[in-house]
Amino acid sequence: MKENKIPVGAIGLGRLGYLHAVNLSTKINSIKLVAVAEPYDTVREKFSSEFNVKAYKDYHDLINNPEIKAVVITTPTSTHVEIAKEAINAGKYVFTEKPTSDTLAGAKELYEFVEKKDAFLQVGFMMRFYPGHVGAKQNILNGKIGKPVYFQSCGRDSGVPKLEFVKKSGGIIFDMMIHDLDLARWYLQSEPIKVYAQGGVLMHDYLKGIDLDEAIVIVEFEDDKMANLEVSRNCKYGYDARHEIIGDKGAVRVGPQRDRPYSLFTTFSNKDQHFEYGKEGELCDSRKIDELCSNAMLQWQSSYIAEFEYFAEHIMKDIKPELTAYDSFMAIKICEAAYRSIKEGKPIYLK
Ligand SMILES: NC(=O)c1ccc[n+]([C@@H]2O[C@H](COP(=O)([O-])OP(=O)(O)OC[C@H]3O[C@@H](n4cnc5c(N)ncnc54)[C@H](O)[C@@H]3O)[C@@H](O)[C@H]2O)c1
């Protein structure tokens, strides 16, 4: 049994890392979590005794463990480049959380390193694995909405983060909207050329001068495509993430409702296919159909599992993931341009 499973080590047991480690330990059949690394004693010891895995205080010891074939990195963003490069040098398959770096230069350094080493590195843009997005993308690839030309999203969080988190998060666009920016590139299959953004603090005075609680970003893409994205921490009714892709023959909408992870709208001339509810996705457990999740990590739990299943499958087949360090670099590039646009009050050209 053990021999058929990929031996994985997880680095970082914080807010998301702990959940990742639990998922790796209990939910992914083809993975065996053999070790964790976390400097914080209480958390490390708790996880180690509950899940019966080796636990290192220093992540170098985990990377140097020859038994471990793949590494999952869920440490603070500023540490990703260093840890990922070290794991690659040790010959490991690597999954690292988004963003790959807290700077554009760091993200460039990592994707160039991955390319030079011909390494395997998957980035944690888990929204691509949400059943609604999987279904929407498949419909687009099947030509159901024609050529996708416009992407619209909102990502509204209910939680009010602590100041210490906000200070090291890189800001709301970098921390939250980066997922939507990745989806925009993925759906439109096009690269950004111009970014215009506005942002403000609408409800949380303590964020003034430190971060925004509301931002709107408009991106012009090559091939006459556009995206319009909103991100917010002002959502008092739950965690509300919605995405819509318009094509020249229809549209597909991915919303938070669990009974229909996506809705497909096609042209009026084709009455039979005018409207179709997506069938993929987990049904709501205890929530009522139109109730939202209270936070992002609940909303994306099935996606976190799916991204690790994809990770394991690609390791087994030794095929590189489609979701790469370059995708993270490009998303960070748009984030940086958005912040510059807000500061300078003008559009920023990327090419
Ligand atoms: N994809 C998503 O939905 C999502 C959601 C939340 C966070 N994230 C990303 O995950 C990463 C972690 O975020 P978080 O909110 O869990 O942060 P966190 O601060 O709660 O946790 C980070 C953990 O890493 C540990 N750590 C720090 N340095 C370490 C080192 N050198 N070796 C081992 N462990 C170390 C810390 O002690 C802490 O327990 C960030 O990059 C963040 O952007 C992604």
Image (spheres, rainbow, N blue to C red):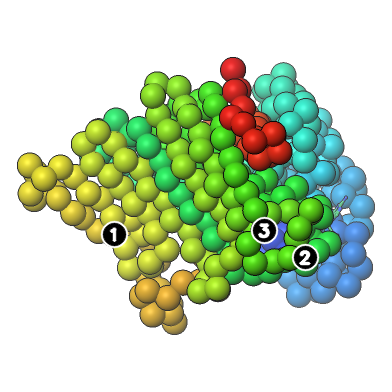
Q: Position of residue 42 (x, y in %)?
A: 88, 72
Q: Earlier in the sequence, mark 3 or mark 1?
A: 3
Location of mark 1 (residue): 279
- Whichever of callouts 2 and 1 sits on the residue coming sooner in the sequence is 2
Q: Secondary structure at mark 2?
A: helix
In the image, taking residue 2 as reference, residue 285 lies left or right, namely: left
Q: On screen, 224 above or below 13? A: above
Q: Nearer the viewer, residue 139 or 67?
A: 139
Residue bearing mark 2: 206
Question: Looking at the image, which residue is at 82% across and 74% down?
Answer: 46
Nearer to me, 113 or 104:
104
- Disc on the earlier residue, 2 or 3: 3
Tell me where residue 291 sits by quadrant: bottom left
Residue 123 can be seen in this image: yes
Q: CA distance from mark 3 to mark 1?
A: 38 Å
**Tag 2: residue type?**
Tyr
Circle 3: element type: loop
Of labels 2 and 1, the one closer to you:
2
Give the amino acid type for the residue marked by disc 3 in the picture: Val
At label 1, the amino acid type is: Lys
C-alpha span from label 2 to label 3: 9 Å
Q: Nearer the viewer, residue 233 or 190?
A: 233
List x then y, in percent, for residue 61.
Answer: 90, 48
Q: Residue at x 38, y 66 (%)?
A: 257
